[in-house]
Image: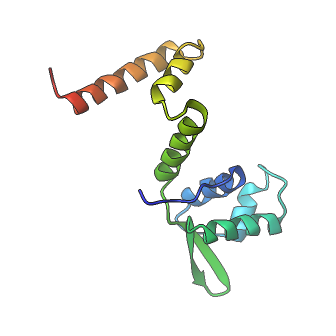
Amino acid sequence: MYKMSKISNAEWEIMKIIWNNSEISSINIIKELKDKSEWKPATVKSLINRLLNKNIIGFNKLGYEYLYYPLVSEDDCIKLESFSFVNRVFNGSIKSMLLTFAQSDELSKLDIKDLKDILNQLIKRKCGED
């Protein structure tokens, strides 16, 4: 994964829409945000420009319209945000993060089962079959 600029919470909202559409115009982004936010069209266009400047999205020009598409996958952005969160809040310790969640009683039995399955798969992949 290449060095990518962090995106703000507002930019995340724009990206969710762009990730869900192969190419989308600013007008359609504004329409999709209409029920979710009170942003004015100029605000949405400013956020789009910030994403363009960060090389997070690209565009194709079709007549007078610009169609925006992601240059960075949603998975890559999630990974970057996840590692940033772990570094910022837990000093880079994933173990500390997991212990905090495990001790908080917020995990359901299904969450615990899923985590056990993930950890068992990870053990097999990293350590080989025993």
User: Is residue 26 shown left or right of residue 19?
Assistant: right
The spot of residue 83 in percent (x, y) is: 51, 41
Residue 112 drawn above or below residue 59? above
Residue 112, quarter of the rendered image: top left
Residue at (82% x, 69% y) in the render: 42
- The residue shown at (48%, 20%) is 111
**Residue at 54%, 38% in the rendered image:** 87
Image quarter of the C terminus: top left
- Left or right relative to 22: residue 45: right
Q: Is residue 53 above or below residue 29?
A: below
Occupied quadrant, residue 45? bottom right
Q: Quadrant of residue 120?
A: top left
Q: Is residue 46 left or right of residue 95?
A: right
Q: Position of residue 122 (x, y in %)?
A: 30, 29
Judge whether 116 appears above or below 50 on screen: above
Tell me where residue 80 appears, x and y as whole percent: 51, 48
Count of numbered labels shown in the rendering: 0
Q: Residue at x 43, y 60 (%)?
A: 2
**Left-right relation of 117 to 44:** left
Q: Quadrant of the N terminus?
A: bottom left
Asked which colour scheme the image uses, the reply is rainbow
Q: Position of residue 104 (x, y in %)?
A: 60, 14
